[in-house]
Amino acid sequence: MVWLMSYITKFVKKITPEILKIIMEPTLIILISAPLALIVVGPIGGWLGNGLGTIVNFLSAKLGFILVGLLAGLFPFIVITGMHHTLTPIGLNAVATGGDTLIWVSQVCSNVAEGAATLAVALKTKDKKMKTLASAAGISALLGITEPALYGVTLKLKKPLYAACIGAAIGGVFGGLLQVTMYIPQNCLLAIPAFIGKKGMMNLAYGCIMILISFVATFIITLIFGFEDNDRKGNKPAVATAGAAVNTTSTSSQAKISDVKLVKPTTIDSPISGKVEDITKVPDDIFAKKMMGDGVAINPEDDKVYAPMNGTIVKVADTLHAITFLTDQGTQLIIHIGLDTVNLKGQYFTSHVKDGQHVNKGDLLLNFDSKNIKKAGYNMIIPIEHGSKILELS
C-alpha cells in the first residue's frame, strides 16, 4: 500500500494548488488510499497469505528438511510483508498434534540469526549511534522481536541481512535433518524448553545445537561479508557522513559550508545569484529536516547555475532539476532547482554538462525558466545540500 501511495502522492501533488497543499495533500492521499487498502490491497494480501500457507503445507511433504532451511532463510522477507502471521495457524496446529518440525523451528533459526548478524554489526561498527542501536536490537531479536534489527540494521546495511539468511538456512537444514521438534510455540532463544517432549533429551540437545549453529554461522559470515560503515578508519577510500556548520546569517550570495569533523573549513561560492536562507525554513521536510544533508537554500535572482569551484559533475538528474557536484577538494554538493520540480520531467531546464565532466569555477552548468516554473505552481527556492564526502582517510 505504501508503494501505491508513492504514486498517489505524485498525482495529488500535481492537481493540488500551491496555496492549499498543506491541507489538501494529506487529506486527498488518505481519502484515496484508505478505500484501496481496505477493498483491494487488504484482500489481495490475505489471499497471498493463504496461498503461502498452502504452498508451505504442500512443500513440507515434498522437500522435507530442505524446506526448513529454505523457510528459515526466507523468513526475514516474509516478516517484511507481514505474511508470517499466516503461518502461525499451521505451526499451532502442528504443536497441538504432536510437535512442530517446520514453522516454529524455522522462526527460531531466523530470529537467532537476525540477532547474531545485528550483534556482529554492533561489534564491528565504529559508528557510535549504530553500535548503540545494533546492541539493543540484537538482544531484542534474540528474544523474538526482530523488527528493530531488521529495519534499523540488517536491511539498511544489506550484507548483514544476506548473512542472516544464510546462517538461518544452515541452522534450519541441520534442524530439518535431525527432525528437531518443538512442543511449545516459541520463536527465539527462549525456545530451549520447547524442545523438551516425547523425543527425549536428544531432541533438546539437537535443538540447542541448531540454535548455536544459526548464531555462530551468521556471526562469522557477517564479519566476513562486512558492511559499509559510516565511520571507518584506515588507509582506504571511505564514504563518511560529515556534520556541517552552516553560516546562514549572511545575505550575500556566498554560502560558507564547514565540515568540522573531517576537513578544514571550506568557503564555497554560491552557484546561483540570490539571497542565502536557512535550509530549515524550506517548506519541504526532506530539506528542512536535513534528511539529505546539511546546507543552505537560495532564493534565486537569475536563471543560471554556475560551477562554484573546480570540480566534477557526478550526476545530472534525468529530469535536469538537480545536479550532484564534487569539488576537487572532495566536497560534495547537491543543487536542487525548486521543490517537486522532478514532476516537470525536464521541461523548462537546459543542461550544459554531462555526467563525469570536469568543469572550472564559473562554468555554466544549467539554466532554467523560473517564470514558467512558477506559473506551473512550483516553489523556486533552491536547496543546496552538503552531502557525504568522498575522502582518503588516514
Image (cartoon, grey):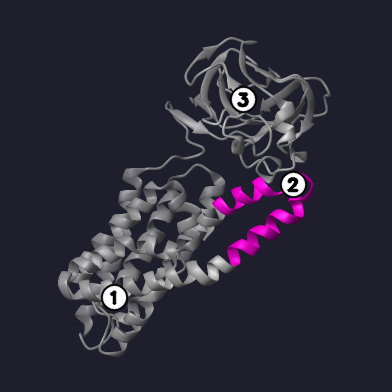
Residue at x-position 38% and y-position 58%: 116
Quarter where residue 14 is shown: top right
Q: The residue under label 1 is which amino acid type?
A: Thr
Question: Which amino acid type corresponds to the residue marked 3 in the rendered image?
Answer: Phe
The amino acid type found where label 2 is placed reads: Pro
Camera-side residue of 68 and 204: 68
Out of 89 and 11, give the one closest to the viewer.
Answer: 11
| Position in image of residue 43 (x %, y %) | 46, 72
Number of residues whose C-alpha sits closer than 10 Å to that of mark 2, classed few (under 14), some (14–19) or many (20 or more): some
User: Is 11 included in the stretch rendered in magenta?
Assistant: yes
User: Badge 2 is on which residue?
Assistant: 17
Disc 3 or 1, which lies upstream in sequence? 1
* Left or right, 303 with reference to 307: right
* Residue 257 visible in the displayed image: yes
Q: Which residues are magenta?
A: 7-34
Q: Residue at x 78, y 39 (%)?
A: 281
Q: What residue would you read off at disc 1?
A: 54
Q: CA distance from mark 2 to mark 3?
A: 22 Å
